């Protein structure tokens, strides 16, 4: 049997192959970005290749990859490049993943040290095939980075551990990342279409549980807009996240990876993002990033410094 060629959309997303094509509207000027060409970008790419690492920057087709990699910032995606879920918005490959690589945490830590990162974001594919959803692998990666790069602050962007025992989440929190991020992705009414393998209130409860386990840990979540939601539904998500004591909210524009993915309902103009930011700050979030190009790990290091400063200011 020939290995899958993940550069081909029909092999990357076999679950979407029979979906009808969705029109891909032309992007407005405010979300166009230049192709990455800088020396810093190339140097970061070389370190990623040398350590045989996967990044969500490439796998998800992030529009900010040129800017972030030019500064030596890359979001590591652990546990392989194949996800067990088939979300209709996501460009990460879907299927049966390979076994975990026991040496991956060490390679990630080596890359973090070599890149000289002040702050690193570690994310992963969903691993519903694993009893703990990969929680211990997250914990091992956090511990390896602490050993190799003790000054680096660590942000994790985890799956929902939907089919796991409670000890899975507890293992990640016990490893003491500086920020625990789990994205809601969209409003609850769109979950059956956009995020069919997930459950909105489970994800909310996961974020709330992190705070119960470690009240000092920063929590973070994000959503995309332009999927067909309305403003009232977005404001309700904000209220739900604040009820779960989430500190940091990100809101960004959904961009359609291929014609087989969920359609872009509309491109939300910058002034609406500014309105979302103002509303979220009014609801009590310590930090809000709401722009068309906002992504979970975009400017994560600078945002973490601001997040800590905001908490200190609040504490007087």
Image (tube, grey):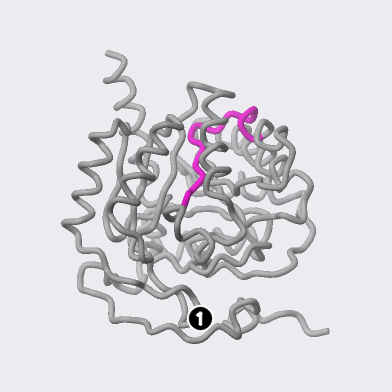
Q: Residue at x 77, y 63 (%)?
A: 98
Looking at this view, name the residue that lies furthest to the right.
Answer: 1
The magenta segment is 172-184
Decide: few, some or many residues near mark 1? Use Cα within 10 Å; few <14, some 14-19, many ≥20.
Answer: many
Q: Which quadrant of the structure image shows residue 139?
A: top right
**Left or right: 140 with respect to 116?**
right
**Residue named by callout 1:** 260
**Secondary structure under the numbered disc 1 in the rendered image:** loop
In this orientation, which residue lies closer to the viewer: 258 or 263? Answer: 263
Q: Quadrant of the C terminus?
A: top left
Q: Is residue 180 magenta?
A: yes
Residue 151, horizontal then vertical, whole percent = 49, 31
Q: Quadrant of the N terminus?
A: bottom right
In this orientation, which residue lies closer to the viewer: 2 or 248? Answer: 248
In this orientation, which residue lies closer to the viewer: 192 or 212? Answer: 192
Residue 207, horizontal then vertical, whole percent = 52, 36
**Left or right: 269 with respect to 251?**
left
Q: Is residue 238 magenta?
A: no
Residue 295, horizontal then vertical, whole percent = 39, 55
Residue 191, horizontal then vertical, whole percent = 50, 58
Image vertical order of residue 147 relative to residue 46, above or below: above
Q: Which quadrant of the structure image shows residue 305?
A: top left
**Left or right: 305 with respect to 244?**
left
Instruction: Please give the count of numbered marks on the rendered protein.
Output: 1
Q: Residue at x 60, y 47 (%)?
A: 160
Looking at this view, name the residue that lies furthest to the top.
Answer: 316
Q: Residue at x 66, y 81 (%)?
A: 5
Image vertical order of residue 196 relative to residue 17, above or below: above
In this orientation, which residue lies closer to the viewer: 92 or 221? Answer: 221
Q: Residue at x 68, y 62 (%)?
A: 84
């Amino acid at each position: 049997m020939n290995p899958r060629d993940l550069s081909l959309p029909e092999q990357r997303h076999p679950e979407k192959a029979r979906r009808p094509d969705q029109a891909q509207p032309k992007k407005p000027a405010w979300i166009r970005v230049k192709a990455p060409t800088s020396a810093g970008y190339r140097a970061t790419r070389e370190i990623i290749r040398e350590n045989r690492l996967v990044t969500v920057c490439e796998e998800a087709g992030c529009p900010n990859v040129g800017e972030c990699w030019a500064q030596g910032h890359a979001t590591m995606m652990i546990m392989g490049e194949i996800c067990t879920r088939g979300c209709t918005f996501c460009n990460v490959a879907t299927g049966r993943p390979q076994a975990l690589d026991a040496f991956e945490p060490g390679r990630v830590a080596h890359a973090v040290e070599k890149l000289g990162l002040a702050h690193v974001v570690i994310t992963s594919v969903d691993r519903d095939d694993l009893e703990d959803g990969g929680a211990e692998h997250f914990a091992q990666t956090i511990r390896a980075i602490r050993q190799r790069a003790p000054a680096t602050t660590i942000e994790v962007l985890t799956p929902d551990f939907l089919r796991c025992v409670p000890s899975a989440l507890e293992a990640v929190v016990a490893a003491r990342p500086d920020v625990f991020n789990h994205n809601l992705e969209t409003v609850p009414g769109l979950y059956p279409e956009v995020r069919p393998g997930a459950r909105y209130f489970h994800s909310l409860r996961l974020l709330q549980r992190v705070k119960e386990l470690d009240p000092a840990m920063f929590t973070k979540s994000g959503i995309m807009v332009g999927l067909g939601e309305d403003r009232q539904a977005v404001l309700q998500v904000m209220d739900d996240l604040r009820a779960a004591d989430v500190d940091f909210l990100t809101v960004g524009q959904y961009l359609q990876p291929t014609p087989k993915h969920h359609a872009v309902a509309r491109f939300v103009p910058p002034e609406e993002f500014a309105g979302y930011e103002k509303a979220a700050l009014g609801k009590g979030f310590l930090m809000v990033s709401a722009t068309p190009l906002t992504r979970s790990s975009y400017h994560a290091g600078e945002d973490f410094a601001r997040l800590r400063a905001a908490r200190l200011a609040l504490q007087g």
